[in-house]
Image (tube, coloured by chain):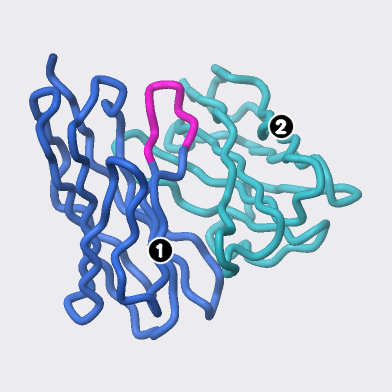
Chain colours: A blue, B cyan
């Protein structure tokens, strides 16, 4: 069974600083996708960034980038120039080509301090 | 583009009562998911539909939970009877087809917060 682990329940950082959220996963599959989702207080899950396991290049989306280490099964999210609107729960998620089930980690609560 | 609609937003019921949640996915989306998110945890998949067929319901407590997706569009999730541990946010999501395609993603609704007292 696939598992996703986020070891940082809470983090806080000053506005405009850079913050990195950690995620590790466990799978025996070779082909899969990884995601970071943001969940603000409105509860609506918003896709932040996506990484295909077969791609060696790390995905980037504006201020958001990932450090994907396939051998280590690590998938961290870096937020540069953090903004107050980045305050939210962040979930790491995984889906493989076998069962197509989207599995989430337990989340990291990120607070951006003015 | 209209998003995934869920209702109600909030529901409070007593244990052993019944409750139903409704989800209207994005038009044309073949895949629909129901997730349970207990406070402090990540979402857990309860059931996944492809059109009106069930793809995965391995984590659905079938003795009390049921879900249907008539005509492959709207879906309802029912709990009967509810237990205290069912208190959670119930999220509905939809996607055009399988998520295993380049650029594909799941779109989530705002969820229903259920409190069982």
Q: Residue at x 24, y 62 (%)?
A: A75
Q: Is residue B20 visible?
A: no
Judging from the image, mark 1 belongs to the subunit labelled A
State the quadrant of the C terminus of chain A: top left
- Helix, strand or loop under label 2: loop
The residue mark sitting in front, 2 or 1, is: 2
Give whichever of B69, A109 is nearer the camera. Answer: A109
Q: Residue furthest front?
A: A62
Relative to B9, is A89 above or below? below
Asked whether residue B84 is drawn in magenta, I would say: no
Prevailing secondary structure of the magenta residues: loop
Q: In the image, residue A69 lies at what x, y percent?
A: 21, 72
Quadrant of the rendering where the N terminus of chain A is positioned:
bottom left
Is residue A44 one of those drawn in magenta? yes
What's the magenta region?
Answer: A38-45
Q: Residue furthest top?
A: A114
At 60% from the left edge and 68% from the top edge, which residue is drawn?
B101
């Amino acid at each position: 069974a696939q598992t996703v682990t986020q070891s940082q329940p809470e983090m806080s950082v000053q506005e405009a600083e850079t913050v990195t959220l950690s995620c590790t996963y466990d799978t025996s599959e070779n082909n899969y996708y990884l995601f970071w989702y943001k969940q603000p207080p409105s509860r609506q899950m918003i896709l932040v960034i996506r990484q295909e396991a077969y791609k060696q290049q790390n995905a980037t989306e504006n201020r958001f980038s990932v450090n994907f280490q396939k051998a280590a099964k690590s998938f961290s999210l870096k937020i540069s120039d953090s903004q107050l609107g980045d305050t939210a729960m962040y979930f790491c998620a995984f889906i493989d080509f076998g069962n197509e089930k989207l599995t989430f980690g337990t989340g990291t609560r990120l607070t951006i301090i003015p | 583009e209209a998003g995934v609609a869920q209702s109600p937003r909030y529901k409070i019921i007593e244990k052993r009562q019944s409750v139903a949640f409704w989800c209207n996915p994005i038009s044309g989306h073949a895949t629909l998911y129901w997730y349970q998110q207990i406070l402090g945890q990540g979402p857990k998949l309860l059931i996944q539909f492809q059109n009106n067929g069930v793809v995965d319901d391995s984590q659905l407590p079938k003795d009390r939970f049921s879900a249907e997706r008539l005509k492959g569009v709207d879906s309802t999730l029912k709990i009967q009877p509810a237990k205290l541990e069912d208190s959670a946010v119930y999220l509905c999501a939809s996607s055009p087809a399988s998520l295993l395609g380049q650029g594909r993603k799941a779109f989530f609704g705002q969820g229903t917060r259920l409190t069982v007292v």
